[in-house]
Amino acid sequence: MKVLLCPLSSGGFLYPATAAALELHRRGHDVTLFAPGAAGRAAAAAGIAVLPSATDGAPHAFDVSRWFRDGASQYRVVREAARALRPDVVVTSVLCPGALLAAETLDLPAVVLGLACHLWPYAEGAPGGGGGDADSEDREWRLTETLRHYQALREELGLRIPEPRAAARQLYGAAFLLRGHPDLERPGAVLPSGVGHVGPLWWEPPAGGAGGAGDDEGGEGGEGAALAAHLDRVGKPVVYVHLGRTFGGESLWRWIDEAFTGTGLQAVVELARTPDRAPAPGSDVITVRRPRMGDLLARAEAVVGNGTSAPVLGALLHGKPLLLRPNGGEQRLLAAACLRAGVAAPLPERPAESEALVRAVADPRLRTAVGALEAALAQAKSAAAAAQVIEEAAR
């Protein structure tokens, strides 16, 4: 079987696709992956054919921040690769309308890798499907906006415009794989046909330069060793903070500066896709941009963030309680899901009261719920589950 994987190029989308690619390759399939950086080097070292995610002619085809602007270039890149490679199935990320339409026009099945929980409406008429509340309205709005961009791309490419219900179904591809667990969905909710959980598909570039990654990317030498030495010198318990986009909301920086200045805690702040920002003078805060978070999650006492899939799943897989303050994007629905499941607490409003953070981290109910979901996610065998779905779609 030939598989073409074309995920968005940021780690939260690229790494799960790499996990699936490695498992498919292990099963003996002919696998090609669009992948930049450390993920591309690791995949190539494993024997997977790797294509660049950015070219002179299509520099933003797989850029998540431009998913609704560069669908046409993504369509052309994926269509060209698929016509040359003749895959049996295309695997892509949610928010990749160009890849979906390329697969459609070549009559290829497409499997979509989603996020940690379902963000669009649940099955109509099913128990738990909701209706009329803020959660349901948010899901409807999110689907409507996604469909608007999808239909606009179809028009730009000169493709037939289906009616909204049929177009919504096309967004799921032949199968739509969620990377969380049913406990992160609304109680009693029924997922639409073809949508299911496979588990986290957790993967990060190898530490210490394996697969061609440098020490600054791996975490066992270079900057990784320097960071570990710094945390040891400070000697305070570590909180891992992962910044998500603010979407016009409030940044966590004011809270960070106060919570880790003159208190009993220190923070490692992953800037991710947010702008550079120096911590407040005298604070026990260090900022990083790293392609892997697992070593820091293993060391942390808790994880603070806005509620995006990668740090939430990473925290749960490492048994760490979450403290969340969402803004936009997936953050509101996923943060609400984590609060319902008992694996997260709202971020304390008064950051200067660090004891409130310590109490939340030590809450035995939170710890128990996190441990239960950690075990469930670890048992999911998600790479194998995803590979099986992809194999079935190709048939």
Image (cartoon, helix red, strand yellow):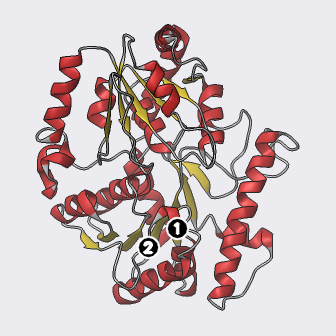
Q: Residues within 10 Å of mark 2 (few under 14, many from 20)?
A: many
> In the rendered view, would you say 252 is above or below 291?
above
Mark 1 and mark 2 in contact? Answer it, CB < 8 Å: yes
Q: Quadrant of residue 268?
A: top left
Q: Amino acid at mark 1?
A: Arg
Q: In terms of image quadrants, where is residue 57?
A: bottom left
- Pick whichever, 1 or 234, lies toward us: 234
Q: In the image, residue 238 lies at what x, y percent? A: 33, 21
Callout 1 crowding tier (Cα within 10 Å): few <14, some 14–19, many ≥20: few
Q: Is residue 395 visible?
A: no
Question: For the residues marked 1 and 2, what is the alpha-carbon distance in whole angstroms?
Answer: 7 Å
Identified by mark 2, the residue type is His
Query: Where does the N terminus fall, quadrant-wise?
Result: bottom left
On the rendered structure, is 206 left or right of 126?
A: left
Q: In the depicted view, which residue is nearer to us: 40 or 395?
A: 40
Give residue 382's position: percent from left, percent from top: 41, 46
Q: Secondary structure at mark 1?
A: helix
In the rendered image, which residue does mark 1 sit on? 66
Query: In the rendered image of this protein, does residue 332 appear above or below residue 79?
Result: above
Q: Residue at x 80, y 40 (%)?
A: 134
Q: Residue at x 52, y 79 (%)?
A: 103
* Residue hosting label 2: 60
Q: Is residue 194 visible?
A: yes
